[in-house]
Image: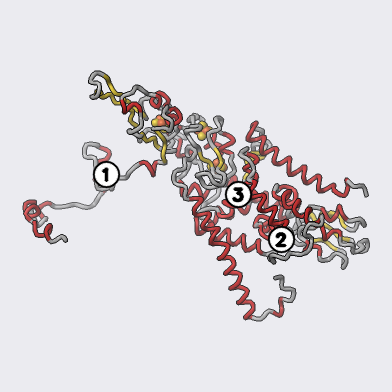
């Protein structure tokens, strides 16, 4: 297997992530009409909107009624991620993923691969953060997670040209590198949490053919949500948990072609 | 923390787990809440035209920034952490770039969440009328306004898009020199939109005319004061149902004036 094909999805993901940011940036800078706004709400081709369901849930929690445009935008997103592609927002869209992936990669390069000495945190922490976000929005009368959401802060910084908040991204990077493996995206981020919750019944899944698997566990060293790869080396089947981001890393690193994307 | 064998958790463990999780959520929630609370309490922020009132605005704005993109003058900015507005929401700083009061109000037109509400800047016939905007109100610092010193300056007056309406010049004799006129600007809060062209134009090092949110700059009179000389205001009386029959009042005015006892006892 050639070296490049070991990174085929990774490269594609980076291209998609960067393209989306460039389109947003161009909309602000030059008035392009493909994707205006940012990841919380975007206007597509000057005709319809896409909206972040978690941001909208928080707005609803403050007791505000949303407009039809936004409602449709949320439904499109929920339908697309939830029923078709799964949690690909995290691996193919979100720019914070680039930061946390690099931290994970550095860890793998021998830097602190061994365990999480400092902090043990359940992967379901993100669901508690999600619930907390809604409760706080209700109490405080403002979408509480959106105030601290590093995705929003980062994307706005890039798109509206006031610069990326290095502090926020550095904190996440160091947290993932030094404290907890896949700490932010895999444990804390309620946006990822939300998409995990709705992605159980998606069409696009990673499929394992266990006969080909040699149990080398290469896939598990790259997967940001290792718990979803429970069936590897045991039995053939789909990786069905919602937490799988369909990033395709496991597929591209598998030397034995035991994994592939499966639609339907 | 993952319980592999969840069937064996006793009720006590479950309760303990719940208490622990609740406690942790409180622990995380408190500083988070404190930060959000402090972040949203920016009281001197100026919003785009047509913005619903601040409390509703921070609830409903989804922070998409489409208004910012539509503004042809780069007036609007999205707040980053540390700015004087709820993170991610649009605001403007007139001393840097004021609102140029576009007649087609593209920022309002673009807002997908009705946080910028067309009705607030439209006439009854649904046509945009930017002059109805209430972004804030200009306030003059008479101590530092050069015109109040007697030096001739009408920079704000000339810059105002509602020329001679939102700012008027009051002519007064300059008592110091005895032979000059002072031309003192005065803002009419009923007309001023808060666009900030005046603040932008003010020639003093730090602007001596500046825009504040209306609720910060303006007082409020209780309902029982009525402008008797103003027909419209006077008509408010018609809707009251309190009627005082002067013959029914027991004490006369003189009794009140002579009643020194209650004054003295009022220790
Ligand atoms: S009215 Fe025009 S100048 Fe003023 S904020 Fe809106 S788009 Fe910008
Ligand atoms: S367009 Fe509306 S929802 Fe979007 S940032 Fe501006 S005010 Fe907020
Ligand atoms: S803010 Fe200043 S320039 Fe704008 S309408 Fe008011 S007085 Fe005129």
| Label 1 sits on residue | B236
The picture places residue A43, in percent across and down from the top left corner, at 64, 40
Q: Secondary structure at mark 1?
A: helix
Marks 3 & 1 on one chain: no
Quadrant that contains the C terminus of chain A = bottom right
Q: Mark 2 and mark 3 in contact (Cβ < 8 Å)?
A: no
Mark 3 beta carbon near ligand 2 (under 8 Å): no
Residue B112's x, y, as percent?
57, 42
**Which one is closest to the eye, mark 3 or mark 2?**
2
Q: Residues within 10 Å of mark 1 (few under 14, many from 20)?
A: few
Give the answer, above or below, for where B235 lies relative to B166: below
Query: Pointer 1 indicates a residue of which chain?
Result: B
* Residue count near mark 2 (Cα–Cα under 10 Å), binned few <14, some 14–19, many ≥20: many
- Element marked by disc 3: helix
Residue that mark 3 sits on: A71
Residue B138 in picture, x, y percent from top left: 39, 35
- Whether residue B263 is visible, yes or no, is yes
Q: Gap between marks 3 and 2, in whole Å?
A: 36 Å
Protein chain holding label 3: A
Residue at position x 60%, y 62% from top?
A131
* Dot 2: element: loop
Vertically, is B136 above or below A71?
above
Towards the viewer: B66 or A71: B66
Q: Which mark is residue B58?
A: none
Q: CA distance from mark 3 to mark 1?
A: 42 Å
Label 2 belongs to which residue? A180
Residue B105 visible, this angle: no
């Amino acid at each position: 297997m050639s070296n490049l094909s070991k990174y085929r999805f990774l490269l594609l993901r980076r291209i998609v992530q960067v393209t989306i940011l460039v389109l947003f940036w161009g909309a602000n800078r030059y008035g392009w009409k493909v994707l205006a706004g940012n990841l919380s709400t975007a206007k597509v081709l000057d005709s319809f909107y896409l909206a972040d369901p978690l941001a909208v849930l928080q707005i609803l929690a403050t007791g505000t009624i949303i407009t039809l445009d936004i409602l449709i935008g949320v439904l499109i997103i929920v339908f697309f991620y939830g029923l078709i592609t799964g949690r690909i927002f995290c691996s193919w869209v979100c720019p914070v993923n680039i930061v946390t992936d690099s931290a994970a990669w550095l860890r793998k390069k021998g830097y602190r691969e061994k365990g999480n000495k400092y902090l043990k945190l359940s992967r379901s922490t993100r669901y508690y953060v999600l619930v907390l976000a809604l409760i706080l929005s209700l109490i405080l009368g403002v979408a509480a997670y959106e105030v601290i959401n590093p995705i929003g802060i980062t994307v706005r910084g890039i798109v509206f040209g006031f610069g990326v908040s290095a502090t926020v991204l550095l904190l996440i990077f160091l947290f993932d590198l030094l404290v907890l493996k896949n700490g932010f995206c895999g444990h804390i981020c309620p946006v990822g949490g939300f998409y995990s919750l709705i992605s159980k019944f998606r069409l696009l899944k990673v499929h394992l053919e266990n006969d080909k698997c040699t149990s080398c566990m290469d896939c598990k060293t790259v997967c940001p949500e290792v718990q979803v790869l429970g069936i590897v080396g045991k039995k053939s089947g789909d990786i069905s948990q919602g937490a799988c981001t369909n990033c395709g890393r496991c597929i591209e690193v598998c030397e034995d072609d035991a994994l592939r994307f499966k639609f339907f | 923390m993952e319980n592999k064998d969840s069937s064996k958790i006793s009720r006590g463990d479950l309760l303990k787990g719940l208490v622990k999780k609740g406690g942790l959520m409180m622990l995380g929630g408190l500083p988070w809440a404190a930060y959000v609370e402090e972040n949203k309490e920016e009281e001197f922020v100026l919003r785009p035209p047509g913005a619903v009132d601040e409390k509703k605005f921070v609830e409903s704005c989804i922070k998409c920034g489409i208004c910012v993109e539509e503004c042809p003058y780069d007036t609007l900015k999205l707040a980053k952490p540390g700015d004087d507005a709820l993170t991610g929401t649009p605001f403007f700083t007139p001393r840097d770039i004021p609102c140029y009061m576009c007649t087609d109000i593209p920022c309002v037109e673009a807002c997908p969440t009705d946080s910028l509400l067309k009705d607030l800047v439209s006439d009854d016939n649904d046509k945009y009328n930017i002059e109805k905007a209430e972004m804030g109100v200009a306030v003059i610092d008479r101590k530092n306004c050069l015109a109040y010193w007697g030096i001739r300056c009408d920079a704000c007056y000339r810059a105002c898009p509602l020329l001679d309406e939102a700012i008027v010049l009051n002519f007064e004799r300059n008592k110091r020199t005895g032979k000059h006129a002072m031309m003192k600007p005065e803002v009419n809060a009923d007309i001023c939109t808060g666009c900030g062209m005046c603040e932008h134009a003010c020639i003093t090092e730090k602007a001596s005319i500046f825009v504040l949110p209306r609720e910060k700059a303006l007082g409020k009179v209780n309902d029982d004061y009525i402008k008797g000389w103003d027909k419209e205001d006077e008509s408010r009386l018609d809707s009251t149902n309190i009627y005082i029959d002067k013959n029914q009042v027991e004490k006369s005015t003189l009794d009140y004036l002579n009643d020194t006892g209650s004054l003295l006892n009022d220790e």
